[in-house]
Image: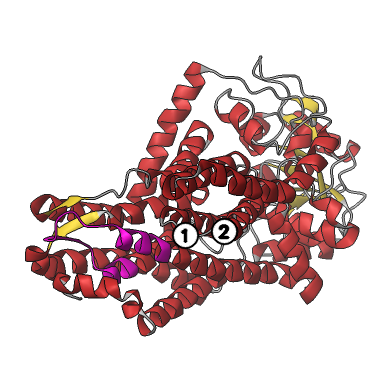
Amino acid sequence: MIPLGRAQAEQENPQLFKPHARTFFWCLAIALGALQVWAHRNEVSPDGISYIEMAEAAVQSGCHALVNGYWSPLYPAMLSASFRIFHPSLYWEFTVVHLVNFAVYLVSLFCFEISLKEMLAARRAESVPEKELQPLPEKILWICGYLLFLWSCQFWLSPAMVNPDMIVAGLAYVATALLLRLYQGKGDSPLFAGLGAMLGLAYLSKAAMFPISFVFLASGFLLFGMTRGSYSKALTRSTLALAVFLGVALPLVFALSKEKHRATFGDSGRIAYAEYVNRATLSTHWQGEPAGTGTPAHPTRKVLTDPPIYEFAEPVAGSYPPWYDPSYWYEGIRPHFSLKGQLWVLFRSANLYLKLFSRSGALYVLFVALILVVRKAGQWEWGAKHLWLVWLPSTATLAMYALVLVEQRYVSPFALMLLLWILSSARISTNDGGVLRKRTVPAVILALALAIAWPVTRDLREVIANRPYEHWEVAAGLHNLGIPPGTHVGLIASGSGWYWAHLAGVRIVAEIPWKDQARLLAADPVKKQEVLRRFSELGAKAVVTKNAAVAKSMDGWQEIGQTHYYVWLPVANSK
């Protein structure tokens, strides 16, 4: 640790932390990221399956396959490029996806460094009103910054997640760094052009960044006007940023609007609002309930009521069409304001933000220690009166998600930047530097390090266990049972795990949702046989489930290899 009395000298030389310490943290980040990716190499979310299949469709039929009302195109475009380069077999396809994720993770770390560097430069440039009060030494802030980044990648936004959120994180770090440069009075037209480009790419990564981009642009305009004293020049440069942003974003907006026959920049937000605020059916099989949520233009087709069977063979592609493009099946949904629903969502979001902060308890140690030290021998210095404009986009993002749906991966970069701003705002008396050096800082660093150690240990156990690739075993088992690629199959109560269908090349064309499995189990034998017959009538050559109770409650089911999946084959199709 370094004495607080060296803070001034250290601030005059911001390179004091580098290069050996930076090299250490980069090696640590590479090791932890690689371990995490490898430990979870066989795990895939429903979102990830859709992105992978969009990428494959783009390889086969071109970029128009990336236009999707629910999923954004940049991430599948990157996956598509990697598939073109490596030409992986289906078995190695997911490994290539994780290699892309790992590369994005490292780029995100580099972008985080840029943001942290600009934050410290902005704080360094501010005058300290009382000489006996100094900010935390920059070396400590760099160490805490790296540890918080690694901690967030273990608990908030993992590089093993097959989704575009890590891309959004890197772009958000750079966009915030550009605002910090404007706050320092630096940058001109090229900076604004870069800001517009970053925001355009962020929108191509995630539709939710479209409205937030205008908050970034407004902050850039006001920061330039306040620091340079010329709002006319600020308007000119902000117009350039807006033009670049629209140049990147509008082709997608036009393509989506043409496809939907209405103006839209993406339907994920409106669908989520209807689901969580208006209580529309969550994720799949919306049939127009509850009243007031609209009339579905082309929903999945409910062919049996008790238990419900939904058919969706046409016209959407994908191994599981309801999740390949949910915006098609939810066309006609009408989100509307509901005070009761909105209050419930805000309560839920507050609870989720508390859980976000509470992961592992490390942040409690960090901020309790910091608050106690500042209260005893220091004060908070939040910066010049217009510094809040730098953090307005991050705060607006947290507020936007609170209105609809908070997930850790969505808000991770914005929450992380706000945490670091709070850290950098502490001012400590130089006379009490010993307390900081001997107690507080080691406790904070130890808390973060121990918190990171727990998931690292878990990932090491996963690597050592070397669990079988179950989805691949299911796919191979279906082929061994005479179910070739292109076959239509049914699905019963298997939740969200259908990567096996993608690997096997089969299409799920009808299902009984997992939430309705109890109704199937409660049915009499005649009804259960009717259910299987109905699947066959819908063109399913096999029915798959992961619910052992369902398989054991009817005749004709067999376990697929050594997996937890079961398959039912009509007599004519069985071997």
* Extreme residue toward the top, this view: 291
**Magenta stretch?**
117-143
N-term-proximal mark, 1 vs 2: 1
Instruction: Determine the residue positioned at 72% across, 21% down.
Output: 288
Q: Is residue 421 visible?
A: yes
Residue appearing at x 42%, y 63% in the figure: 118
Dot 1 alpha-carbon crowd within 10 angstroms: few under 14, some 14 to 19, many 20 or more: some
Q: In front here: 243 or 568?
A: 243
| Farthest residue, direction right | 572
461 in magenta: no
Residue 247 location (% of width, % of height): 74, 49
Q: Nearer the viewer, residue 517 or 285?
A: 285
Per the image, label 2 sits on a secondary structure element best described as helix
Q: Which residue is mark 1?
A: 186
> Can you say which quadrant of the picture contains the C terminus?
bottom right
Residue 106, image x, y percentages: 54, 71
Circles 1 and 2 in contact, beta carbons < 8 Å: yes
Q: Residue under circle 2?
A: 191
Q: Is residue 108 above or below residue 565?
A: below
In the image, residue 491 lies at what x, y percent? 75, 44
Q: How is the image coloured?
A: secondary structure
Q: Is residue 90 visible in this depiction of the protein?
A: no
